[in-house]
Amino acid sequence: MAQSKGKIIKKKIDKKTVIRKSAIVGKKITKLVAAKGKEKTKPQLEEEILMQPPRGMRDLLPGDQPYWDQIRRVISRMALEYGFQRIDTPVVEYANLFIRSIGGGTDIVDKEMYIFNTKGGDKVSLRPEMTAGIVRAYIQHGMNVLSKPVKLFSTGPVYRYDRPQEGRYREHFQANFDAFGEQDPILDAQLIQLAHRVVTSLGIKNIQFQINSLGCPKCRKEYQELLVAYFESKKQKLCLNCKRRLETNPLRILDCKEDKCIQVAEMAPQSVDRLCPECRVHFKNILEYLDELDLPYIINPRLVRGLSYYTKTVFEIWSGDEDGKKHSLGGGGRYDYLIEQLGGEHTSAIGFGLGLDRLVAEMKRVHAKSYTGPKPRVFLAQLGDLAKKKSLRIFAELQKNGILVAESFGRGSLKSQLRVADRLGVEITLIIGQKEALDETVIIKDMTSGTQETVTNEKLVNAVKKILKNNVVVSHSDELRSQNDTE
């Protein structure tokens, strides 16, 4: 009987279930294993932790944050000036939301979506773009009853499982601006103007817009039939991907980067030549608005964008360098039928997205200025345990009164702390030693003249403000307001 039990126990150990089974059998298993002494439970090997993020993803380090801060500040300011309200949607949505809105035959749906099943069996996806989620929120929360146009903006990460190239990432960041409920072409022109202002405000000046019109479903059907007939006659010259696109999404052939497909597309029919009267007038008016605004643009008849929901206007923003190389910074267009396609009422809409990673790279390339935050003008130094306790309260009191203070808590030597103050270039150093801590006083040292005085804790804030002549940077938002006042 004991031998039989021993065999059973050995089987359990081999399956690595000793811990779970011991809750039922109790101490008997432990005794038997000890008695036999033949087998010991093998420790589970821990999987090695790789000290790097997954491929195509990376850390945004403190050294790069001034560029990101500058972009965030400019976007927030422009959104306010143009009447856009912030909306944040989930990074994870049901996968069919993107499949239905973006459309089959696109690289995003066919190759690039992060799709997985939850433990509950839901098929979800990391968002590959922002517009579909914003449209879903617009429908779900009944925003159609709001006064038109409804203007929304959002920033955040998006995910594309494509092969990362230079300057591209599987996790990248976008800013999206969308306007719902207005079909007048003046809104198209205003969003292009907004994109221009955001980019140029970041110090990227050499930019150009490429623009095209894809028409509405009525005139696009006739154009697409003509396009398919043309590409069918050139099918042997197309790459394998474009031969498949000919069946699923022929417009995407115009956007192929293969040399042989580019040559074929050069002579393809152009959508602007096949617009219905309404779409032709709409496109003509946009171009007139852009001329009035003196915005740099060219008509690109092969511009189609990578998403199936676009109608009428499509555009992209490009930055150029001295060698003639172009860098895409973002783009957008109209999607007048997407809300209806996803179950809402028919609503005209237009939007665009900017690639924040690309903006940062371009800012660095053109040596654009990054954000420089307010620098502390006061340094708090302390010496001794009691002084450390008192300094925390004084630090908080100064900050509460809008005085930006630097410190080096934890440094024991007063000399080393004063070296930090010199390096920061502060105007005033506050010194608290053992005596000052007991007396409830602080030494105020003028770092320029070298003079110093002792004041009580109650009078410290007013004394510091007086020396600084009340010219105190309170916060980033206040600095932003003062900058706006001078622009």
Image: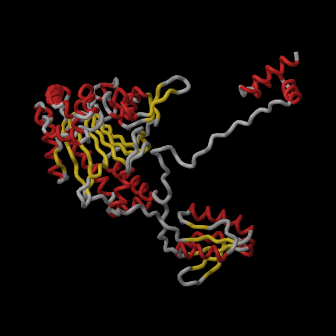
Q: Is residue 452 above or below residue 257?
A: below
Name the residue at 63% across, 40% down. 47
Horizontally, residue 316 falls left or right of residue 127, namely: left
Quadrant where the C terminus sits is bottom left
Find residue 99 and report its horizontal and vertical position in percent: 37, 28
Asked whether the viewer can see residue 156, the reply is: no
* Foreground residue among 21 and 422: 21
Name the residue at 35% across, 53% down. 359
Find residue 117 and report its horizontal and vertical position in percent: 50, 27
Find residue 140 and report its horizontal and vertical position in percent: 40, 28
Name the residue at 45% across, 30% down. 115
Quadrant where the N terminus sits is top right
Horizontally, residue 132 falls left or right of residue 444, namely: left
* Foreground residue among 145 and 216: 216
Which quadrant of the structure image shows residue 40?
Answer: top right
Q: Residue most toward the front? A: 38
Which quadrant of the structure image shows residue 453?
Answer: bottom right
* Foreground residue among 332 and 407: 332
Name the residue at 40% across, 54% down. 73
